[in-house]
Image: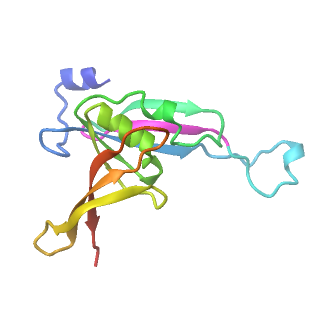
Amino acid sequence: MRQIHDALGTPHRVILPGYETRVRDGSHLRATKRRMDVLRMINGEPLLGQALVVLDPQRQLIEDMYPDECGHTQETDPDRLIVDLQPGIGWYSDRSFCTSVFLQAIALARSWFVIRRHASFSHTEVGTLRIVSRCGAVRTQGTKADPMGGTRPTSQRKATTRVS
C-alpha cells in the first residue's frame, strides 16, 4: 500500500524530518455478549484474540497486522516482535514492548526507538542526568539494558520528562 500511496503523490505528514517511523501496538479483540451456555456462570466476558499492528504514521497506513486467536498471548511474544524490523526505522511503542529481547533486536537491526520504560524493565544508569531543555523539564542519561538469556547489554539513552 505504501508504494501505491507514494506513486499517487498523496502528501504525507512529516513526523520527524529525515526519519521513517512506525508505531507498534497491540489490542485485544472485543468480546461478545453472546456466550455459550457453559460460560454463563462465569462473571467475566471471554477474552478473545489479540492483534498486533504496525502503523506508518507518516502515511496513516496500517502496514502490518499479526492476529492471534488466543487472547492470553502476550503482545511481547518475541517471534511476533522482530519480524518486520528494518534498518534506520524508528519505533514508537507503549511500555508493554519495553523488553530486552525487543530492544536488542532493534539495536541489531540498526534502528532506534522511543518506548516508555516498563516498571519491571531492568537497566543500569550510566553517567549523570543532564538537563537538555531550557525549562529543565527534559533530562537525559545513558543506560545499559541488563542482559537476559546470555545476551550482551545494550547501550541506550533514557529521557525523563517532568510534566507540571
Q: Main secondary structure of the magenta part?
A: strand
Instruction: Identify which residue, 1 or 123, lies in the foreground.
Output: 123
Picture quadrant of residue 121: bottom left
Q: Can residue 61 be seen at all in this image of the molecule?
A: no
Percent across and percent down for residue 12 are 19, 37
Name the quarter where the C terminus is drawn. bottom left
Front-lying residue, 2 or 112 = 112
92 relative to 118, above or below? above
Magenta residues, start to end: 48-58
Quarter of the image containing the N terminus?
top left
- Residue at 52% x, 42% y is 75
Whether residue 85 appears in this view of the structure is: yes
Q: Residue furthest left?
A: 134
**Is 59 on the left-hand or right-hand side of 68?**
left
Vertical comparison of 147 with 64: above or below: below
The total of numbered circles placed on residues is 0
Quadrant position of residue 117: bottom left
- Horizontal arrangement in the rendering, residue 73 relative to residue 88 (left or right): right
**Residue 74 in the image: above or below residue 117:** above
Is 131 covered by the magenta stretch?
no
Query: Which of these two is toward me, 97 or 33?
Result: 97
Q: Is residue 56 found inside the magenta-colored segment of the image?
A: yes
* Residue located at (13% from left, 68% from top): 133
On the image, the x and y values in percent for residue 30 come to 62, 46
Residue at (65, 41) in percent of width and height: 71
Picture residue at 17% right of the left edge, 45% below the top = 16
